[in-house]
Image (cartoon, rainbow, N blue to C red):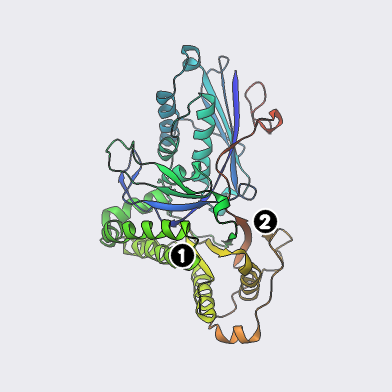
Amino acid sequence: MSIVTCIAPVNIAVIKYWGKRDEDLILPINDSISLSLDTQQLCTKTTVMASPNFKENKIWLNGREESINNKRLQNCLEKIKSKATLTNEMEMWKVHICSNNNFPTAAGLASSAAGYACLTAALAKLYNFTGDISEIARTGSGSACRSVFGGFVRWYMGSDPTGVDSIAKQIAPASHWPEMRIIILVVNDVSKKIPSAVGMKTSVQTSELIKYRAEVCVPKRVELMQKAIIQKNFKQFAELTMRDSNQMHAVCLDTYPPCNYLTDTSHAIIDLISSYNDASNSIKVAYTNDAGPNTVLYLLEENVPHVLGLIDYFFPPNETSNNNYKRGNPPASISPSKDLLEKLNCKKQQEGSIKYIIHTRVGEGPTYLDDPSEHLLNNSGLPKDL
Ligand code: DP6
């Protein structure tokens, strides 16, 4: 038998992927750029095991057995087997897969990207495949192709109908911009979600704005963003990030029926950040939202205490928030001055509108864990924690 365990990061896009030109192969209508986040705070861990004793392929996700016949899962499994050079024996062996997130899946934090990147990286090692794995991860979930690298990553949309050139490449490693910080504001929300795959499909079918975005705006923006990252130009990086998030959500509203991913709390956070940047006469923080109400802030290390102070003031936690409210060892907050509060035209929000906060940084790509105690499957191929 053969066993591999791997962890892989979540990524948050600063130039968004929104819309496919091929639903089956998961080919996008534009390039996108993201930052992979430190796996210490957010990651997926996956163990894959192949054995002549297994009767069928099986998968357990976050402690529950799920169907292996999921199309996206099959895409990844089949694609990697067809690309790897397998011995006849290995070809016949079935696989068991066990995968867990180190963060609550229900929080809506892009878990499929980390999940498929991790699965693909683990299978690549299991089958001794050393080629590009971003193309394979992409067939599980589009944004997953960016999580196969750490640091700053660009997904090239490509033009080949087979998808061979729709791959991700690293722009710069995490160490390139060590001052970059990320604050994730997990918003309290109970509304029904439109999955991103459904939302973007409806956008491609019904939005007129999406064509202009993909053909005119994003091609310019990806080049500017790549340059801003290479030059560590925070102002340019932040402005492009906010403009691109705004535009993705404008496309979502231009979709019919509309996809309304932002809640009152998300809008209140966006207003606060915009007022703060205005009052500072410079861009200190960027906000961005994916297909949900959680708002992610990008900022430089020196501004973290001030921004946390603003969040504490305008979005006070409620009494039930415990010492797990701020995660990832953030520095102590600095309360906003009276002068700043007067300049900001913002209202205090209801207590508890933010569920919790994660402070993190840019991190590495998939990492293999060789210590057998890290494996999620036991010697019989069953989850250790069942
Ligand atoms: C809003 O990668 O989840 O997060 O390819 O259908 O699995 P599928 O979609 P997915 O879409 C993510 C969209 C986004 C923006 C982004 O990450 O670029």
Quadrant of the frame with the C terminus? top right
Q: Amino acid at mark 2?
A: Gly
Q: Position of residue 35 (x, y in %)?
A: 51, 53
Outermost residue on the front side: it is: 231
Disc 1 residue crowd, few under 14, some 14–19, many 20+, Cα 10 Å: some
Outermost residue on the top side: it is: 88
Taking depth in this image into account, of 335 and 48 the one nearest to the observer is 335
Residue beneath label 1, please?
262
Which corner quadrant of the image does residue 327 belong to? bottom right
Mark 2 vs mark 1, foreground winner is 2
Picture layout, residue 22 above or below residue 106: above
Q: Residue at x 65, y 48 (%)?
A: 40
Q: Position of residue 24 (x, y in %)?
A: 33, 38
Which corner quadrant of the image does residue 384 belong to? top right
Q: Residue at x 44, y 30 (%)?
A: 131
Q: Check disc 2 and report its element: helix, strand or loop.
A: loop
Residue beneath label 2, please?
328
Whether ligand 1 has any atom under 8 Å from the Cβ at mark 2 is answered as no
- Whether residue 291 is visible, yes or no, is no
- Mark 2–mark 1 Cα distance, whole angstroms, equals 25 Å
Taking depth in this image into account, of 76 and 282 the one nearest to the observer is 282
Q: Position of residue 254 (x, y in %)?
A: 31, 64
Q: Residue at x 50, y 44 (%)?
A: 147
